[in-house]
Amino acid sequence: MREDGKVDYVELPGGDLGQVKAFYGAAFGWTFTDYGPEYAAFDQGLDGGFHTGQDDAVQKPLVILYAHDLEAMEAKVRAAGGAITKPIFSFPGGRRFHFTDPAGNELAVWSEG
């Protein structure tokens, strides 16, 4: 069961998805679910995915937390001193927002539907 504020997903830069998938498949036995030509998801104890888009967030790993109530969590992040870098937006499978913490680390929070 997903819980508020827990690490739920990690996105990594994908580069050449074919090469990345072949490497992780051969080295570790990973399998993937493709979501279009720019995204391949994995489930290897912690869900995650490789993204090849030009979005700034895919230039480094992105830790994604979960929230049952995305608007309430965004308000809590703001109140605690986090800076919203990407307001709530939709993507296939849910909605999310990005923020930076006081140390400058960028994270995201997502919710289903």
Image: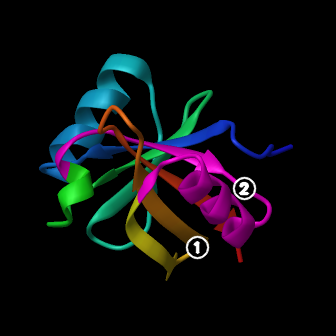
Q: Which residue is mark 1?
A: 95
Residue at image point 24% right, 53% down: 58
Closer to us: 28 or 3? 3
Q: Earlier in the sequence, mark 1 or mark 2?
A: 2
Q: Where's residue 30, x and y in %?
A: 45, 32
**Residue 68 in the figure: left or right of residue 81:** right
Q: How many marks?
A: 2
> Which residue range is magenta in the image?
59-83
Q: What percent of the width, then of the height, locates residue 108?
A: 48, 53
Q: Give left or right: position of 77 versus 71.
A: left
Query: Residue at the spot x=61%, y=72% of the render?
Result: 93
Query: Within 10 angstroms of label 2, few (less than 14), some, or many (20 or more) residues?
Result: many
- Please identify the quarter of the rendering in which residue 99 is found: bottom left
Residue 42: give x, y in percent of width and height: 49, 43
Residue visible at 34% across and 61% down? 39
Is residue 110 rendered to the left or right of residue 32? Answer: right
Q: Is residue 79 magenta?
A: yes
Q: Quadrant of the N terminus?
A: top right
Is 87 a magenta residue?
no
Horizontal side of residue 75 vs 96, given as left or right: right
Q: Is residue 112 above or below residue 28?
A: below
Q: Please give the name of the residue rendered at 56% of the width and 30% of the height, measured from the top-left corner.
A: 44
Name the residue beneath numbered marker 2: 67
User: Amino acid type of disc 2?
Assistant: Ala
